[in-house]
Amino acid sequence: MLLKNKIALVTGASRGIGATIAKRFAAEGAIVAVNFLKNQKKANDIVQSIIDNNGQAFPVQADVRNPKAVHQMIATIQDNFNGLDIVVNNALNHYTFNPKTRQTAESIKWQNYQSQFDGSVQGAFNVCHEAIPMMSDQSSGRIINMASNLIAFPLIPYHDYITSKTALVGFTRSLAAEVGALGIQVNAIAPGLTYPTDSSVETQNDVRESIIRMTPTKRLTIPDDVAGSAIFLASNLSNNITGQCLYVDGGLVMR
Amino acid sequence: MQVINKDTLKIIPVDLFKIPKATFLTEFRYQSIRLGETVYSLRLPIPTLAELNVLINQLKANQKAYLSHLKVAEIIDWIDQAIQCWTNPKCPQRQLAIKLLPVITGYNAETIKLEIKRFIRIFRKKELLRFVDNELNQPEILDDFHPQKSGSLTKAFGPQTIFNVFSGNIPGLQIWPLIMGTLVKAASLGKTSMAEPLLPVLFVQTLAQINPRLADCMAILPWKGGTQSLESVAATQTGATIVYGSDKAVGSIQPLVPSSKPFLHYGYKISFSMIGREALTPEHYPQTIKRAVEDIAVYDQQSCLSTQAIFIERGGSISPLAAAKLIAAELANYQLKRPRAVLTNPEAAAINRTRNQYQLRSLNDSTIQVLASRQNTDWTVVYHAKAGFTNSPLNRFVHIFQIDQLENVPRYLNDYQPYLQSCGMAVDPNRLYSLADRLGEIGIDRICSLGEMTRARPGWHHDGHFNLLDLLHFVDVEPSMEAYAERLDPDVE
């Protein structure tokens, strides 16, 4: 097991990629805090399925955009486990990837950008701000921020989403440059269109097929693909790798 | 274990039958499907002989009182309105179909959603007009006497009622004979298969919202196939019988149909594909592979239109073996994208048996290679370096034959001649018609592009024959009668 007895927090873990990462972390031996915003039932279901498979997990509610709520969440983890080894910043403000109804450059408002920044960048900031002191106490820690391959190849220009995810990669690099000295590695994963998830179901078949056509592996990304890379970046397999952005998109972006 | 809270469950009744007003079914059995917090309670009738007789008589009366007086153009308009409803994603019947069919049939939910969307569009007004025109030079002869080049005036009549035996392999396919019958002004008694009893019922429900009198000329209900008492009444009391299904289904109904009445049947068929070297250039081969797999994966080869074997020509930029390997990899991707239906034990055993047979042969025969998914039956490619032909146990199992020249394909098909149906091709225009000619000669009746095999056009001569024409009888009023009648006009001098 690659993550035996590690304490891991996965934000936005009640569904989609986050839920899959939580399950796979637990299968590798981690004790997983399954963070959710609203959907207590789904979070409970994920926790239950982890426990059913002899893993360890617990649900923890917090709006990552709210510093107080995040403080409370991290304090709960500290009280119960006296440490935190892995953080996956996966939560974002709800976003629907629908090429037919997306905001155009003309119609989009600053508020749209702001709300994506709040979810992705501020959310990651709040969690890191609380987690880093704990990680530095133990001279080790892994932080994984969930970006998107759209930042390198804005195939469909979801302006607000792409801008905030690009900022998140900047945040990742800058943070990595400083906290590396404390034994903490900070990396990002940039998945391609991950299907199926609740956010991506509205991306129509024609668009999906056009992405598949351009993708070397001739398929879309599935949540398990992303979870595999998350395990890599969370485990000792990725020792001495920091400030990187790992593209998990079948080779659509190569850099 | 999941805890079920009965208080939060919503129960929605769904009738798996649709019968005309003033007719009744009295005995039922129930099945339920649970999706999240919603339980769909499915009601299936157990019809009696007496009820079936009443039903058929009512259909006849409704046909006589209403459908027989509609003009073909009007019928097309009404059907088109129902189709327009179904092209709207908000159509409640379409939504219900998309929810329940994956559970009923086991097919991948996304495949069903996409294919129903595509399928329903082939029945738009313009397509129905084309279809009727394709079958009849003057569609109006279904409405009235029209002059013919021979000098006669002719009118065409369909049967008053048709007994349709629907198959359940492909969702929605039942709509096809249902519309065909209605176009020739026949009331339809449709016996659905337990494998897919839902979609025709939902379609007639939509029609009933638009034109209840037209919908009352249709009765859709399931019963256990092979119930001879019911099937005998249905076949003798109606004017024509159409059977879709296995050879066994066809064989069990045929003896029940009086020889004086039209009997149309669409039984077991085999389809295959041909890939020319011109489709295996660096520019084209990735799309060629994708198209080939589409014909294997959509509805897991359960349609008679799906490919069972692929001939791949030598001399392209990639070899037939390389193409076979790419097809195998694409089948693996397709499994991630849209998994195949879960198989019954006999279906899985059929795949394992055939796999084993070829794996054994490949030990001593280097011309055979088996490429297959590990630890499961998800997909199988059997590559044959020597040309030949054989059918497949289906469910994403395909044979690939290397061949020097596609022109040689017909010589391998002799043993299968009575069963051959569609051929999906990837060839350039210079070869298309000469190849089509050779294939037509040995009995293939449909040639379409690779990747579109499972989506037949409405005007297709299904299994090589006309569709409407075989149901019709014609009345000719000869010139002698026309002239004689003129003489008997008391006012003529």
Image: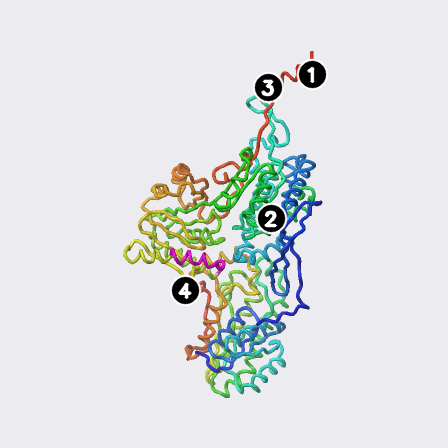
Q: Are marks 1 and 4 in contact (CB under 8 Å)?
A: no
> Considering depth in this image, is B3 or A11 the residue closer to the camera?
B3
Say the numbered circle drawn on residue B200.
2
Q: Position of residue A155 (x, y in %)?
A: 51, 60
Which secondary structure lies at badge 2?
helix
Which residue is painted at 49% across and 56% down in the image? Answer: A210
- The chain letter for the residue carrying disc 2 is B
Q: Main secondary structure of the magenta part?
A: helix
- The stretch of residues the image draws in magenta is B337-354
Q: Which residue is mark 3?
A: B479
- The chain letter for the residue carrying disc 1 is B
First in sequence: mark 3 or mark 1?
3
Scheme of image coloration: rainbow
First in sequence: mark 2 or mark 3?
2
Say the numbered circle drawn on residue B489.
1
Instruction: Categorize mark 2 by other alpha carbons within 10 Å: few (<14), some (14-19), many (20+).
Output: many
Q: Position of residue B68 (x, y in %)?
A: 66, 35
